């Protein structure tokens, strides 16, 4: 029996020993984000930051930041040039206005659709939600954060601020990142999603 226990301990040590490191993160989204940043072929990190990368800094998951929003579509909105952190501009339009409750207050944010996502017969149902809040420049990235959304079948859409991520230019200035329109400022602290990157 003693020999069997020793054999089991050896097997456990070998299987957990040197090899793949366990991905850090409280949620599946956090682990997937860390996996992407760890992958040199996909990571926006500079080489020197990638060498010592273990995990991004996330706020603790909090379900109050997962909200149900009502989507008011704006089908007649015009395409416009969204400014970025470089000389480039992206063609966007306001797809709709999201209304939701957060911390006892009603808020509204514009949600955007990219012209590139409509280029192939409107097959791409992705929406882009950039926002600013009162954590910017303190615990979160000063330029605001983004959330990826999908066009819903009806007028209800789940917005999970726990999946708010930083623009790539927060990690590497070579990237061109859309600048969050001032209209998308939330006058609250959204302590969810990714924190500012410590270089």
Image (tube, rainbow, N blue to C red):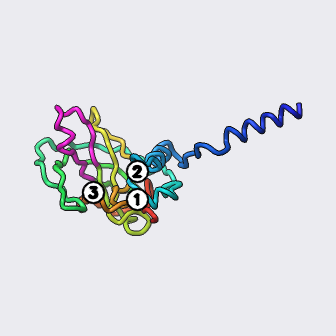
Q: Nearer the viewer, residue 47 or 178?
A: 47
Neighbour class for label 3 at 10 Å: few (<14), some, many (≥20)?
A: many
Secondary element under disc 1, as helix, strand or loop, is loop
Placement of 56 over or under 117, stated as above or below: below
Mark number for residue 177? 3
Q: Residue at x 14, y 41 (%)?
A: 75
Q: Which residue is mark 2?
A: 43
Q: Which residue is mark 1?
A: 46
Q: Are marks 3 and 2 in contact (CB under 8 Å)?
A: no
Specify whether residue 116 is painted magenta.
Answer: yes
Front residue (pair 17, 195): 17
Chain-order first, disc 3 or disc 2: 2
What separation in Å lies between label 2 and label 1 (alpha carbons)? 8 Å
Residue 52 visible: yes
Magenta-drawn stretch contains 124? yes
> In the rendered structure, which disc, 3 or 1, sits on the residue that comes first in sequence?
1
Label 2: few (<14), some (14–19) or many (≥20) C-alpha neighbours in 10 Å: some
The spot of residue 176 in percent (x, y) is 26, 57
What is the spatial separation of the Cα atoms under label 3 and label 1, in whole angstroms? 16 Å
The residue positioned 23% from the left and 48% from the top of the image is 112
Residue 58 in view (yes/no): no
The image quadrant where one finds the N terminus is: top right
Q: Quadrant of residue 132?
A: bottom left
- Secondary structure under tag 2 reads loop
- Looking at the rendering, the stretch of residues picked out in magenta corresponds to 109-128
Task: Using a 10 Å C-alpha cutoff, classify the residue at mark 1 as few (fewer than 14 neighbours), some (14 to 19) or many (20 or more).
Answer: some
Indicate the position of residue 103 as horizontal and vertical percent values.
Answer: 41, 56
Nearer to us in this view, 64 or 173: 173
């Amino acid at each position: 029996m003693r020999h069997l226990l020793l054999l089991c301990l050896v097997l456990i040590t070998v299987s957990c020993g040197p090899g793949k490191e366990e991905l850090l993160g409280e949620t599946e989204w956090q682990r997937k984000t860390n996996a992407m940043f760890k992958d040199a072929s996909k990571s926006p990190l500079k080489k020197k930051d990638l060498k010592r990368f273990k995990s991004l800094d996330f706020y603790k998951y909090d379900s109050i930041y997962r909200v149900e929003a009502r989507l008011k579509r704006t089908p007649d909105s015009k395409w416009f040039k969204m400014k970025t952190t470089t000389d480039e501009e992206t063609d966007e339009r306001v797809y709709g206005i999201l209304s939701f409750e957060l911390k006892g207050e009603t808020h509204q944010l514009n949600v955007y659709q990219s012209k590139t996502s409509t280029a192939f017969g409107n097959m791409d149902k992705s929406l882009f939600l950039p926002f600013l809040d009162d954590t910017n420049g303190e615990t979160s990235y000063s330029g605001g954060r983004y959330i990826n959304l999908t066009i819903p079948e009806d007028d209800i859409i789940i917005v999970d601020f726990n999946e708010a991520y930083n623009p790539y230019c927060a990690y590497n200035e070579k990237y061109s990142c859309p600048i969050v329109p001032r209209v998308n400022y939330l006058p609250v602290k959204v302590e969810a999603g990714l924190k500012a990157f410590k270089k």
